[in-house]
Amino acid sequence: MEVIFKIIAVGLITCLATMIIKPIRSDFAVIIAIVGGMIIIFMVINYLSSVFETFREIIGITGLNSSLYTLLLKIIGIGYLVEFTAGICSDTGNSSLGDKVLLGGKIIILVMALPIITDILQIIMELLPS
């Protein structure tokens, strides 16, 4: 629980620093915002190991193909990376570019999710009476 307070503190300090520096040196303000975001990401990376461990347990319990879980993790990762990148684009005044990054990410996620959707539909079809 204390980690969330550290993340909030880094976020607020980064915001204040960028607000103070932006009128003086806008290029440094962008760098400060990016570094603050990276610090927050590094603070959260340790928690990813528990996510991977949980997925390993789910794979063992369900006996389903592990490639589906790998695909799901890739989709989640793409979603986070695209959102982070779009935020950086918006922070630098390129919100239109950020919107395009989001659109590209959503299309890639949709294409990657198609095998999962077809597997779910096959399972549903098998469960329905003929």
Image: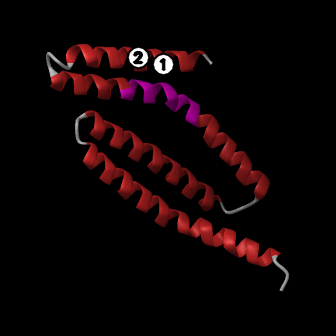
What colour-coding does the image apply? Answer: secondary structure
Mark 1 burial class by Cα count in 10 Å: few <14, some 14-19, many 20+: few
Give how far across and how far down residue 31 sits, in percent: 24, 26
Q: Is residue 42 magenta?
A: yes
Q: Specify the segment rendered in magenta.
A: 37-48
Q: Residue at x 17, y 24 (%)?
A: 26
Q: Residue at x 66, y 47 (%)?
A: 55
Left or right of 111, for residue 120: right
Rendered position, 87 above or below 110:
above
Q: Amino acid at mark 1?
A: Ile
Rendered position, 17 above or below 105:
above
Q: Which residue is mark 1?
A: 8
Q: Which label was assigned to residue 12?
A: 2
**Could you tell me which quadrant the C terminus lies in?**
bottom right
Give how far across and how far down residue 90 sits, in percent: 29, 38
Left or right of 82, for residue 74: right
Q: Amino acid at mark 2?
A: Leu
Q: Residue at x 20, y 20 (%)?
A: 22
**Could you tell me which quadrant the N terminus lies in?**
top right
Q: Which label was assigned to residue 67?
A: none
Mark 2, secondary structure of its residue: helix
Left or right of 75, for residue 125: right
